[in-house]
Amino acid sequence: MLARGSLPEGALKTLIAEWPGDPSTRGDVLPLRLAGALHRLVIDGKVPDLAACYPPQATEFDAVCLAPALKVAISAHESFLCDYLKLPPQTNEVRRSSMVMAGLLEISNAVGKPLSLLEIGSSAGFNLYPDLYRHEMGGLVAGDPASPLVLAPEWHGSQPRATTVTIAERRGCDRNPLDPTRAEDVVRLKSYTWPDQLDRMTRLETALALVGNAALHIAQADALDWLSDELARPAPQRCRVVYHSIVLQYLVPADRERFAEIMVAAGARANEDSPLAWLSIEADGRSPGCAVTLTAWPDGTRRTLARADFHGRWIRWGEA
């Protein structure tokens, strides 16, 4: 609707029109940023007219209700909306943890060692704790079978070749990490979860409780500097697993190249005593979904483990 001309003249329209990066869903996902910013105003109770157009007050889309309410909200809160747009979205979709767990199972089967997890773009840390959730992968159950959070993607193909993982250490970084015990950060996460997605909101709240109790600190750091430092530390008798999900699109091309160089250099130092794995869950320009790929050192082999829905609704194991 905003794209059809209802965006009023002003700072917000100028910011969007002159956006310095890639506004598309393969870049800075500007539509998601704007939707999250508007939803945040609704959650905070600052735009009652707009809230009347959102579930649960509204049960269906109503352009007659929405158009004037958007203009009022933008006019009254333009500075807030501009500031919100400048921050990367923090979706931290917990269902992606099933992709992570499946990859960790495959790695565990190959190396037979405890895993040291290193995640970039950790947000609130949901995907650093895949073992806190119950994962149903076709005929395989992994993670905590008694967990209150059950992740059951529509599964196609065979299953990973292990059933358990041993996690010796977990570390994560983010430019703007979120604390699952901090009210402001919780609301920010909820702002990117749409009000008609009740099941998704329930999963988010359950994950917040589980990870909040774990009290893991996410480092606020540049991903590449942090990763270089982490990979410089010795890790005898452990397999370090560097992983990320829907993160690389937020890096400029030069940083993506440097990231790959850091991984290749660390891979050259890996050995049978201290192997290294790179688990990537990212868009690859193909459809449907994203690619789940694994590169393992010391031999440096790379293979595609699966294709998966961006939000973890389905996983096609073994499909390239």
Image (cartoon, helix red, strand yellow):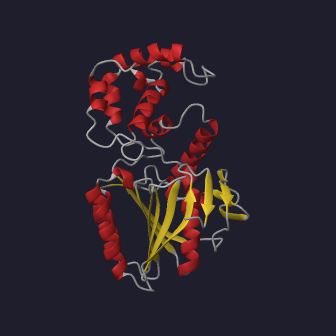
* Residue closest to the eye, 21 or 100: 21
Residue 71: x %, y % from top left: 40, 16
Residue at position x 32%, y 22% in the image: 78
Whether 129 is drawn above or below 304: the answer is above
Residue at position x 43%, y 40% in the image: 185
Residue 35: x %, y % from top left: 45, 31
Residue 234: x %, y % from top left: 36, 78
Whether 48 is drawn above or below 303: the answer is above
Residue 231 can be seen, yes or no: yes
Residue 315: x %, y % from top left: 61, 57
Residue 229 can be seen, yes or no: no
Whether 24 is drawn above or below 111: the answer is above
View extreme (right): residue: 139
Residue at position x 42%, y 43% in the image: 25
* Residue closest to the eye, 261 or 221: 261
**Residue 248 quadrant:** bottom left
